[in-house]
Image (tube, helix red, strand yellow):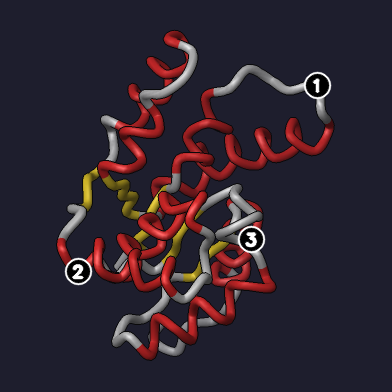
Amino acid sequence: MKPTVYVETSIISYLTARPSRDLIVAANQQITDEWWNIRRPDCDLYISEMVEVEAERGDTDAAAKRVEIVRQLDMLELTDDVQQLAERLLEKRFIPQKAARDAIHIAVAAVHGMDYLLTWNCTHLANASIRRRIERFLREQGYESPVICTPQELQQFMEEEDHVERPDS
């Protein structure tokens, strides 16, 4: 069975953006492009309406490119359970109010049982200092936490998995 991956908006943005002059951003864009072209077929990818809304914002031409990618992915619902979990993440201050959309991304991925939440948002999502607290909180709420990671981390994990001998093979 393929791993399930919730694709947060920053991934779509990096994938469709013009090449950056900033070396770190340019490297992240290249990593995103490589993951998308090489590893994406090995996963089942999902987004939520929040990703669609975020992708539609900004420069018209850039938004059109993002929306083109978004429309290729399966949509997960923003259910009442998602809304309630996102509110609890904000109430507990794991995610600041100004980043309420990030709480929704986490809640969507958790409620729908995603294996991974793929992001370049290292401020509120792929952040080692808060990731463990979020994982613990989600377990307390009865949800398995998705692994919140960047494309680089997921690609490395998938490559390691490729080299692990399987007992049934």
Q: Residue at x 50, y 76 (%)?
A: 134
Residue 153's disc number: 3
Residue 112 image point, x, y percent: 25, 66
Marks 3 and 1, how far apart in space? 23 Å
Real-space CA distance between mark 2 and mark 1, rounded to the nearest whole angstrom: 41 Å
Q: Which residue is mark 2?
A: 81
Between circles 3 and 1, the one closer to the viewer is 1
Q: Secondary structure at mark 2?
A: helix
In three-dimensional space, the C-alpha distance between marks 3 and 2, rounded to whole angstroms, equals 29 Å
Q: Could you tell me the amino acid type at mark 3?
A: Glu
Q: Quadrant of residue 32?
A: top right
- Amino acid type, callout 1: Arg
Measured as percent of width and height from the top left, residue 100 is found at 43, 53
* Front tag of 3 and 2: 2
Residue pictured at 52% horizontal, 63% vertical: 95
Q: Give the residue at mark 1.
A: 21
Camera-side residue of 146 and 103: 103
Q: Residue at x 65, y 55 (%)?
A: 123
Mark 1 or mark 3, which is nearer the start of the sequence? 1
The residue lying toward the viewer, choosing from 70 and 125, is 125
Q: Amino acid under label 2? A: Asp
In the image: residue 79, left or right of residue 166 = left
Q: In front: 104, or 24?
A: 104
Q: Earlier in the sequence, mark 3 or mark 2?
A: 2
Please name whichever residue, 11 or 99, is drawn nearer the observer in this view of the structure. Answer: 99
Mark identifier at residue 119: none
Q: Are marks 3 and 2 in contact (CB under 8 Å)?
A: no
| Badge 2 or badge 1: first in the primary sequence | 1
Residue appearing at x 38%, y 15% in the figure: 64
Q: Give the quadrant of the N terminus.
A: bottom left
